[in-house]
Image: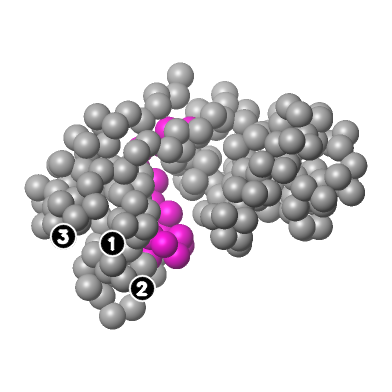
Amino acid sequence: MIAAMTPEEIETALGEIAQADQAVANALEEVGYPAPRNRPTGFGTLVDIIVGQQVSVAAGASIRAKLAATVQPMAPEIFLATSIEDLRAAGLSGRKVEYGLELAEAMLAGALSDTLLSSMSDSDAIKEITKIRGLGRWSAEIYLMFALGRRDVWPAEDLAIQEALRRLHQLEERPDRKTSGELVENWRPHRTVDALFLWHYFAGAPA
């Protein structure tokens, strides 16, 4: 069973990190604690992740709303039965329509089941998810964090995370995966919570 993240868990984890990292402690004083972002496992959440790729938050929300009204319920077999014209009218690009259709077919064939992914390590689950076209490492990490409840995932390529770390540690440039990994090494085993906090910090802290 996947354990949903709670506000109490977030506060406890960030409290531990703040004791070891003064920059986090200062940032907590500035912007407070983030809320959980728990999501259900399955096709709908993976489609939402695909929708959110390379679009603004507002655009992603608009497309998700139109898509949800078009594909009811959001299930692989219903998605496959929806015309390409209707999927495009909901706001999906041609490429994202292709990704959604391939994802639906794969999941109907048994790929990415909760049973399969829950038996895997984080790294193996990421490899399994990224076998599906349209789901890269970032997408897999987001799914692990918020749907599968993995507590120590680090989405280093996320631009908002990079910018938040740059601000937090007053760096000249956004850190790459290697540099950010070194900066957050002492945040283990709570890097999912800390990524959640960095998104919160990015949204609320001055540039």
User: What residue range appears in magenta?
Assistant: 148-162
**Label 3 environment density (alpha carbons within 10 Å; few <14, some 14–19, many ≥20):** some
Rendered position, 29 above or below 206: above
Alpha carbon separation for disc pair 3 and 2: 16 Å
Q: Are marks 3 and 2 in contact (CB under 8 Å)?
A: no
* Sooner in the amino-acid sequence: mark 3 or mark 2: 3
Question: Which residue corresponds to mark 1?
Answer: 205
Q: Earlier in the sequence, mark 1 or mark 3?
A: 3
Q: Secondary structure at mark 2?
A: loop
- Measured from the top left, where is residue 2 in percent x and y? 45, 24
Mark 3 lies on a secondary structure that is helix
Amino acid type at image mark 2: Arg
Q: Quadrant of residue 155?
A: bottom left
Which amino acid does the dot numbered 3 rest on? Ala
Instruction: Return the mark for residue 87.
Output: none
Furthest-top residue in this view? 1
Residue holding disc 2: 174
| Image coordinates for residue 39, horizontal then vertical, percent | 50, 33
Q: Amino acid at mark 1?
A: Ala
Query: Quick check: 159 above or below 122?
Result: below
